[in-house]
Amino acid sequence: PRTAAVIPAAGRGVRLGPGAPKALRTLNGTPMLIHAVRALAASRAVSLVVVVAPPDGAAEVKSLLDVHALPERTDFLVVPGGESRQESVKLGLDALPPEYDIVLVHDAARPLVPVDTVDAVIDAVREGAVAVVPALPLADTVKEVEPAATPGGPEPVVATPERARLRAVQTPQGFDRATLVRAHETVTDNVTDDASMIEQLGETVVAVPGHEEAFKVTRPLDLVLAEAVLARRRL
Ligand code: C5P
């Protein structure tokens, strides 16, 4: 089976503070998106990477892919993204040639995912899972709250799910292509990850071990951590 990766990179990155779209900000001099593209193309199983660019930034992303060294054996496509992450992923799926039957969806905001994690996700799909997520146990206890009576005020806690059964979910998430396409045609709710659309279809999603270095660059402190990880790798 042939495997393609879709990388949604159309987010503005508001939580990171003012500046360029998040995926185009640099880590140790190289755009986050390029780190993410290299991380997925590092897998020998991935033969196509589709980058979903900011709607007005497709030309800029194309030229970034041209000037940075990328593996010869991998093909690259750039398509403009949409208003929501979900819409951006859909636009990426629409651009996939028919011969790909396994699809990975990977956040550009997770530039440092190790290739072993990518391969573990692909292997689980090849072994028959329709949807696979890399996941880690939580360090923090998680509470469910109700909205505060006044904005910024105290939020009543309504539940404490058993921590040992919770997982923080990362990307790349891996899918049987036909199932993911069906999910995008059927599920219209706003979702925060792709696998939850598969759950809504009633299909089984499985978790495989994720990796600490697959963390999402969201807030300013995450940029410091990402550059420290890169320095440790000497990149
Ligand atoms: O906002 P969040 O951190 O959940 O974004 C996750 C990924 O989805 C990022 O790589 C971001 O660029 C992408 N995204 C997108 N299109 C949007 C919003 C987010 O491709 N409209």
Image (cartoon, helix red, strand yellow):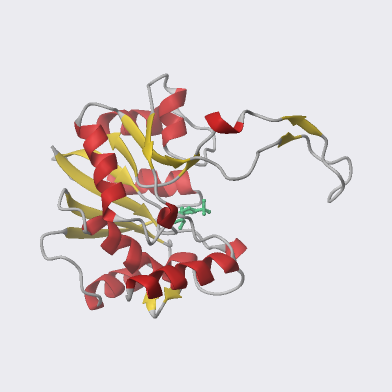
Image point (24%, 78%), residue name: 67
47 relative position to 91: left or right: left
At which x and y percent is residue 182? 34, 28
Residue 7: which quarter of the image?
Answer: bottom left
Q: In the rendered image, is residue 155 in sight?
A: yes
Query: Which residue of the protein is positioned furthest toward the bottom in this rendering?
Result: 29
Image point (28%, 75%), residue name: 63
Query: Which residue of the protein is positioned furthest toward the left in this rendering?
Result: 73
User: Which quadrant does the C terminus fall into?
Assistant: bottom left
231 relative position to 48: left or right: right
Residue 57: which quarter of the image?
Answer: bottom left
At which x and y percent is residue 79? 32, 57
223 relative position to 118: left or right: right
Between 180 and 235, the one nearer to me in the picture: 235
Image point (32%, 56%), residue name: 114
Q: Is residue 20 above or below residue 188?
A: below
Q: In the rendered image, is residue 96 in sight?
A: no
At which x and y percent is residue 2? 14, 42
Q: Is residue 169 above or below residue 202?
A: below
At which x and y percent is residue 31? 38, 73
Total marks shown come to 0
128 relative position to 114: left or right: left
Q: Is residue 85 above or below residue 74?
A: above
Image point (27%, 63%), residue name: 38
User: Which quadrant does the N terminus fall into?
Assistant: top left
